[in-house]
Image (tube, helix red, strand yellow):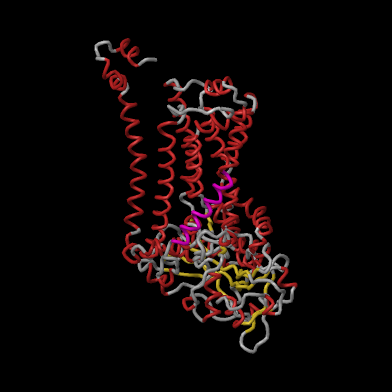
Amino acid sequence: MAGRSGHPSTLAQAYALTCALACALATPWVSAAAALKVNGSSTVTPVVTEAAEQLQGQGLSIQVDPAGGSSGGISALGDGRIDVAMSSRPLKASDHERFPGTDFRSVAIGYDAVALVVSRDVWEGGVRQLSREQLQGIYEGRIRRWSELGGPDRRIVFFNKEPGRGTWSMFAGWLYGDADKAPLVSFPEVGSNQETRSKVASTRGAISQLSAAWADGETVFALGLVEGDGEAIAPTSENVTTDRYPIRRPLLLITNGAPDGAASTLVDFLLGTQGQSLVEKHGYLKVAAPPTAAAH
Amino acid sequence: MSPDGSTALTVPQQPPTSSRLAGLARWPWIYTGSLVATGLAALAFLGMLGLFAVESLPVWRHAGLSYLSGIEWFFRVQRFGALPMIYGTLAVSAIALALAAPLGIASAVFVAEILPARLRIPAKTAIELLAGVPSVVYGLLGVILLRGWMQDVLAPFEPLSGDTLATAGVLLAVMILPTIVTLSEDALRSVPASQRQAARALGFNRGEAILRISLPQARSGLVAAVLLALGRALGETIAVFLVVGRQDNQWPDRLLSLEPLAAAGQTLTSKLGGSETHIAYGDPLHWAAMLGLALILLILVAGVTLAGSAVAGPSSGRAAPGKSVRHPDA
């Protein structure tokens, strides 16, 4: 190591070098600032990311980021920080109230189901289905052991999706009629679909809500749901397409005003043949044949 | 390099008392530049403190002091109590320190006092490299390796999963270890060699010299090392986020019992790192509540850092005056 005080010219050289380096590093960032910014649901992210990669060949630059979930994306759009929000829940009245200056327009690019997934030991222990009442019991802490539900003698580890996630909204909405009516509870929370799957798979006695496309049947297992006196309906693609599975949701792209420029290119691509095959490839359902009524 | 000597050569007409200022006046850009830089750094901190204080005002108006003492946080009904998160942050940091401080100081003793000089720098560099590992890497290692292991270790407490306050604490301990080792080693090396020689001359053996001379004289430096590491532990986000469980409202029934540490919890940073920040954006009260957490965190970290510098400042590297050393056989 050299002496304590650097020679002035050495110091100046080092400074100039640092500046040059900083400029060199900043240049690609500056050019990327013109990119279309897309943010929101981690459920929609894989489809849009792959679409962005394919559109890159056509000279379109798109940044996709799943931080914050559906609500995070909608907030960021309302605040003008991004161009397109991805959401796995429909827009709510409260979104319009919070951002009165934003003209939210949503387009459904596909459909997904929210599955209730359990870890292997629960599945193999005999739990294959749950009724709405049983799930309410788990959510409210009245049912604490799998043995009460015909499963192994082990405690129930309920991982709740973070409140901003579309998955949680759809689940709580089905369970209590309206997500805002869900009781105030505190559970360990999980964020993205990736984190949810890995934590459920690696924890004995675990259950959580997960996008059905991520329920692989190898590490985590999707339960059938029972409503009233009905039979158990598993989130198979047949059951979701025919609208028999109860927790189904649209995958939305949301813009401020009608999509234009790069945003409209992205939306058109995703609604076209290539884009819809991407939707299917990632385990979701095409929008071309929506089971019932549709977009907002 | 006496200041008088150097000024006498260049500016002989200056009286010696103002020689230092006169020396600086020769390079006014250094003087003003460094002043501006220092001012900016200080202003950045004060500005941040002010910004968070002002932005979090709505929640203080809404909840008053119960924002600090409340143990329930349900944003959907506008109930904001930060205490369980403060507890989580302090508990996780305490576990980290309890594990890392003894281990770190012990390895600093070995590196500074026992290891031969030619091995000292490689050993220290290897430890310091650990400090450069990004925290998200530690977090992923925690998810892959630590969660399952901690669930087995904590089995007597029957944790629901491997995501616990204790898991986050152990992970943090690994992360702050290099800070403690490298700063403690510096503190020990700054004890003058003559002190050790004198101790040996008085008949102390090597172990006694370390225990009775080096460690006591480096004490303020060691305390500062631990406090600075604590500052890092309090503020660490992503690694904690991934393994702490992020369960709200985990206020323990018995504050000093160990059992709650084997359960999931929430820290100030894991709350701020979660998606709730995005929901809060746009709702003034909820947003204020989130920024209030940031304010609490900022004050905690600043307090610990100031304490660390205060301890390290005046006496590090100098022998404590007037301290008598009793020979073990005396």
Range of residues picked out in magenta: B83-100
Magenta region's main secondary structure? helix
Asked whether A174 or A112 is in front, the reply is A174
- Which residue, as the protein is rendered here, is positioned at the far front? B330
Q: Does residue A152 show up?
A: yes
Q: On the image, which quarter does residue B79 sit in? A: bottom left
Image position of B198 with respect to B239: above or below: above
Please tell me whether residue B98 belongs to the stretch shown in magenta. Answer: yes
Please tell me whether residue B228 belongs to the stretch shown in magenta. Answer: no
Name the spot of residue A206 as percent of width and height, x first.
65, 68
Q: On the image, which quarter does residue A153 sit in? A: bottom right
> How many marks can you see?
0
The quadrant of the image that shows the N terminus of chain B is top left
Left or right for B325, reference B262: left
Asked whether A278 or B244 is in front, the reply is B244
Q: Does residue A290 show up?
A: no
- Which residue, as the protein is rendered here, is positioned at the far bottom? A229
Name the spot of residue A214 as percent of width and height, x first.
65, 66
Name the spot of residue B271 as percent of width and height, x first.
48, 59
